Image (spheres, rainbow, N blue to C red):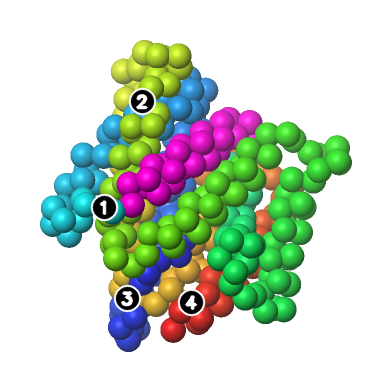
Amino acid sequence: MMSDASTAPSSPSRSAAGILCVVAGICSLSMSDSLAKWLGEAYAPIQLLFLRGAFALPVVALLVVWMGGRRALRTRHLGIHAMRGAINVASACGFYFSLTLLPLVEATAIIFAAPLFVTLLSVLVLREDVDLRGWIAVLAGFLGVLVVVRPGMAGFQPAALLPLAGAVGYAVMMVSARRIGAQESMLTTTFYIAAAQAVISLPWQPWYWTPVQAEHLPGLLGIALCSTLGLTLITQGFRIAPASVVAPFDYTGLLWATLFGWLFWRELPDTWAYIGAALIAGSGIYIALRESRRAK
């Protein structure tokens, strides 16, 4: 995850605080994904997204108003926010569904290919330049995706295409955010993502709604809480420390996914999955560091 982080000099203590925030935030998001994997056996992805948005939206709105005032809720780019919200809902639905079919760490590794697609789309859509080492990092990352997905081989699972499509969708969201520009804060963007998630998923509920069981309510609240807390912590981490310091810690998500997958489902991906995940993480870290240096 990349952010318009503060450009102020960072002391070691601020860097440590930023790293702690990002690691805790990524852990929270991994917990949210784990809950979605569990509850995905009982509820459709679109219902999980609606409940997540409905529970999270009031909290996000209060947080945005508290940190940025009411003017942080205003936007001049409602159409772009709506488009990004629709892409987010479609991507998240595919990812949530894939969690019920794939080991948690494999789905997580594939979705982490998003920065690779961001780089590719930046060249194709925004006409940005990428040097030779940048292209090598992208190719290494895509090689990692192929190692995890393994198309045409006995280990291939069609479900692996769902988080891959989700990675493309998230990349489109990141690139389209640049069309909004710096005149709107990250708080505004966060609010409209949560709002669009609730609003766009609402019309689908008559077809997919399943009555919520009382024993599942804590888990549903946990998805909303962990996802909101995770995004807030990650945002704060990027605000208080340089992106070049904290961005690599995004990939601790692979460690959390491995841990939670083993604890709750006894999932142990094979060696090739770990090799592919390492390639994806390594290329993503290089791209994140490269982008942070270019932003200075």
In the figure, is residue 159 to the left or right of 255?
right
Residue 101 inside the magenta-drawn segment = yes
| Residue holding disc 3 | 6
Residue type, label 2 = Leu
Tell me whether the residue at label 2 lies in contact with that at label 4, contact meaning CB atoms closer than 8 angstroms: no
Task: Name the residue at 30% across, 40% down.
Answer: 195
**How many C-alpha atoms fall within 10 Å of the one at disc 3: few (<14), some, or many (≥20)?**
some
User: In this rendering, which labeled residue sits more in front, label 3 or label 1?
Assistant: 1
Residue type, label 4 = Ser
| Of pointers 3 and 2, the one earlier in the residue sequence | 3
Residue type, label 3 = Ser
| Of pointers 2 and 4, the one earlier in the residue sequence | 2
When asked about the image quadrant of residue 208, the answer is top left
Task: Name the residue at 51% across, 36% down.
Answer: 90
**What is the distance, in whole Å, between disc 4 and disc 1 at their CAs?**
27 Å
The x and y percentages for residue 172 are: 53, 52
| Residue holding disc 1 | 75
- Range of the magenta residues? 77-102
**How many C-alpha atoms fall within 10 Å of the one at disc 4: few (<14), some, or many (≥20)?**
some
Q: Does dot 1 land on a helix, a strand or a loop?
A: loop
| Residue holding disc 2 | 202
Q: Tell which of 66 and 285 is nearer to you.
A: 66
**What is the distance, in whole Å, between disc 2 and disc 4 at their CAs?**
37 Å
